[in-house]
Amino acid sequence: MSTPKYGRVLVKLGGEALAGESGFGIDPQRALELAVKIKAVRSCGVDVAVVVGAGNLWRGSQGMASGMDQATADHMGMLATVMNALALRDALEQQGVATRVQTAIEMRNVAEPYIRLRALRHLEKGRVVIFGAGTGNPYFTTDSAGALRALEINAHVLIKATKVDGVYDRDPLTDPDAVRYTRLSYMEALNMQVGVMDGTAITLCMDHQLPIVVVDLWEPGSIERVVMGEPEGTIIGP
């Protein structure tokens, strides 16, 4: 078997990845499909951590549009990410993958509190670690949480697994002539205001030279190819 290019990865998933056809809620079958994909990545011989969003359960922008305080709306979103993390952990355990959930907001009855050294120890023992509750602070997205946790665990790459196969110059869902980039610098991505990841997360990765790879989550083998160093999606890096 070939040697992976990246020995430790953090996979950032949107909450919609856990939703069924309705686009809302948690579909146990979809969670199992995700677990199979993550297990395949783990089988490449790399350490795997995951950050999952909450778009299938709650979007803070919806509450704010009705006059809700942003901090309250964001905290509700953090709690929703924990529900997704628990669902994904259960699916991974069903696949025989030892998994731990750590949360930035303490809820010891359901998950471990986030402790960096404990997370590193889990990864060293071959366990998948899912980080819930974002950064624990309002005004930060789960993209930013993904970048932060990736740096804290010394990940070699941040993989943004989404519903498109990279970064395009225009929306590929509405414009069939949209062109996909294979590589962008951090500044190019920031200047383009790419929709697949927020600027705070990109800036954090840029400051620490952490590469980001944007791939199609549902393309078979896409994340494994990234791990092995094969061309896939769009690389945002130095």
Image (spheres, rainbow, N blue to C red):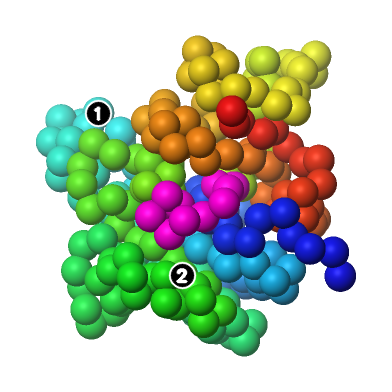
The image quadrant that residue 189 belongs to is top right
* Whether residue 175 can be seen here: yes
Residue at 77% across / 41% down in the picture? 232
**Dividing the image into 4 quarters, which one contains the C terminus?**
top right
- What secondary structure is marked by label 1? helix
The residue beneath circle 1 is 65
Residue at 69% across / 33% down in the picture? 234
Q: Quick one: label 2, few (<14), some, or many (20+) residues within 10 Å?
A: many
Q: At which x and y percent is residue 176?
A: 79, 18
- What secondary structure is marked by label 2? strand
Q: Which residues are magenta?
A: 149-159
In depth, the one of 92 and 76 nearer the eye is 92
Q: Specify whether residue 126 is painted magenta.
A: no
In depth, the one of 115 and 36 nearer the eye is 115
The correct choice, above or below, for 21 with respect to 82 in the image is above
The kind of residue tagged 2 is Val
The residue beneath circle 2 is 129
The kind of residue tagged 1 is Ala
Residue at 51% across / 55% down in the picture? 155
